[in-house]
Image (cartoon, rainbow, N blue to C red):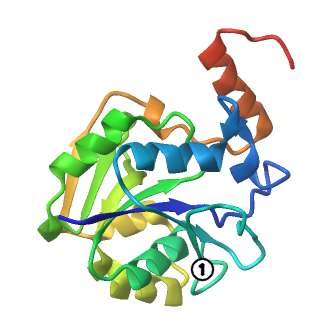
Amino acid sequence: MKIQGIILAGGKSRRFGEDKAFAKWKGITLLEHAERILKKLYLESCIIINETQNYSFLKCRTEQDLIPGKGPLGGLYTACRIFENTSLLVLTCDMPEVTLESLLTLMSSHQVKNKITVFRHPEGFLQPFPGLYEPALSHTLFERMNKDQLSMIDFLESIPEKKVIATQNQKPFLNVNSKKELFQANSRLTGQWSEP
């Protein structure tokens, strides 16, 4: 099974106040962190961006959203259209605590017939990212975007052919939507809680 690494970085970062892909985690940007973890799995990376972003300085491939303004659903659709012959391991750029182990679990559990392999969050809902997706989903994604049905969780629930992995570990799913949340994540890492 061939797998392509995908990093979704096309969000507006409204609550963060600036492009959070460039916020620092362990001394590198969140975007670099996502790229490095995919590299550890010997996967090529492609970053899906919106029309206003310029990541031309990065060494890995970038692609703009084919249909702008549709959030993660639109980013996933773009990846499915561009990479039509390979499974897609999809991360977002704002999940600093995603682990190599969680990605390996997804990869070892996935079968093409399932179309989707994701975790069930300890609180009970399906966790869209990280996840493994098949490009055959592109038509369904397009239909949902046309109806402005942009919820990733609703999309996951609507697909019968999926593998769901139960977990009690919330850590890999932490995403940072504000500078305060990133500070708290960095503080957990260092054990220091004083203000910077």
**52 vs 32: above or below:** below
Count the labels in the image. Answer: 1
Query: Residue 55 is drawn in which quadrant?
Result: bottom right
Percent position of residue 37, x then y: 45, 43
Kindly tell me whether residue 94 is visible in this rendering: no
Kindly identify the residue that appears in the image at 37 percent across and 56 percent down.
Answer: 43
**76 vs 128: above or below:** below
Secondary structure of the residue carrying numbered label 1: loop
Position of residue 152 in the picture relative to residue 16 (left or right): left
Query: Residue 27 is drawn in which quadrant?
Result: top right
For disc 1, the neighbor class at 10 Å (few under 14, some 14 to 19, many from 20) is: many
Position of residue 100 in the picture relative to residue 69 (left or right): left
**35 vs 82: above or below:** above
Kindly identify the residue that appears in the image at 68 percent across and 74 percent down.
Answer: 50
Give the residue at mark 1.
Answer: 65
Question: Which quadrant holds the N terminus?
Answer: bottom left
Kindly tell me whether residue 136 is visible in this rendering: yes
Percent position of residue 34, x then y: 53, 47
Q: Nearer the viewer, residue 161 or 186?
A: 186
Kindly identify the residue that appears in the image at 75 percent across and 41 percent down.
Answer: 178
Question: Which quadrant holds the C terminus?
Answer: top right
Q: Amino acid at mark 1?
A: Asp
Percent position of residue 117, x then y: 26, 56
Percent position of residue 108, x then y: 17, 47
**144 vs 10: above or below:** below
Q: Nearer the viewer, residue 187 or 56?
A: 56
Position of residue 34 in the picture relative to residue 53 (left or right): left
